[in-house]
Image (cartoon, helix red, strand yellow):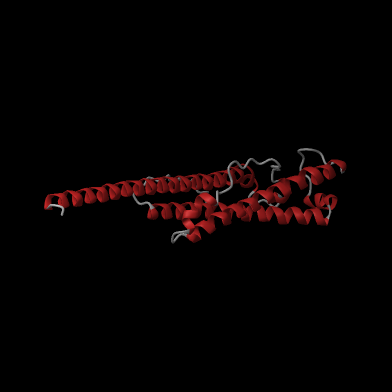
Amino acid sequence: MPEYKDIVAILATLVASFVGAWVAFSLESQRRDRETRDRNVGAGSRALYTIFNLWNTLEQYRKEALEPCRGRADAWLNLAAHPALSVGEHRFQASDLQFLLQSDHAQTYAGLFLEEQRFALAIQLIRIRSELVLNEVFPKMAAAGFPVGRKVAQDDIEQVLGIDLTHKLKEITASIYKNVDEDLLSLVARHDELRSAIKKLYPNQKVIQVVFSLPQT
């Protein structure tokens, strides 16, 4: 029959083994949690950068193209064409942002891809209008003998371009102004929403913050 000291030794060994296993499990769990945290915060930071890139692309276009013609009756005609507008990184990584869906911030996840779609629409409108100007407007004006750099009555231009092309230009130009102006504001709001969500999920982590220069109204 085992003596008391042998039983104690056996129990001590079992306890030590259990404690060792528990500590190892705890450390591994903490390591996985850190990896998950770092991965998610990194994904969120990249998404914040993408938001800034979308905003910056539209803001540069606003300043360079839209503002010089804003409020002018001939903006539909004289807004500069940008057929090869550079957009940079403009897509969010859905798989990297899955952690938002698994939290109370699923709406933020959906909102990011709505912004991506809105940006794509604005860029598409800009390119469609640019192609119309370069491929249809300029050739027709040149064929009509309109002098470059001289003021020409809009009625004469509309007559040369035709009702359909003139209508397209006016509608698309108005849509560009509307979409770009709205997107610039919504992207800032989406940045703040995403950053707030990341800070709530990981309050002790540093998260980048973009300071936007909002257009004067």
Q: Return the residue nearer the eye: 51 or 172.
A: 51
Q: Is residue 88 above or below residue 100?
A: above
Toward which corner of the image does residue 162 lie, by quadrant? bottom right
Seen in the image, is 208 located left or right of residue 132?
left
Q: Return the residue nearer the eye: 155 or 81.
A: 81
Q: Return the residue nearer the eye: 28 or 134.
A: 28
Query: What number of labels is visible?
Result: 0
x then y, percent, for residue 9: 17, 48
x then y, percent, for residue 160: 85, 50
Q: Residue at x 80, y 46 (%)?
A: 137
x then y, percent, for residue 20: 27, 47
Seen in the image, is 60 located left or right of residue 124?
left
Residue extending farthest to the front is 1
Q: Return the residue nearer the eye: 122 or 95.
A: 95
Q: Quadrant of the N terminus?
A: bottom left
Residue extending farthest to the left is 4
Seen in the image, is 214 located left or right of residue 86?
left
x then y, percent, for residue 125: 69, 51
Q: Is residue 81 above or below residue 98?
A: above
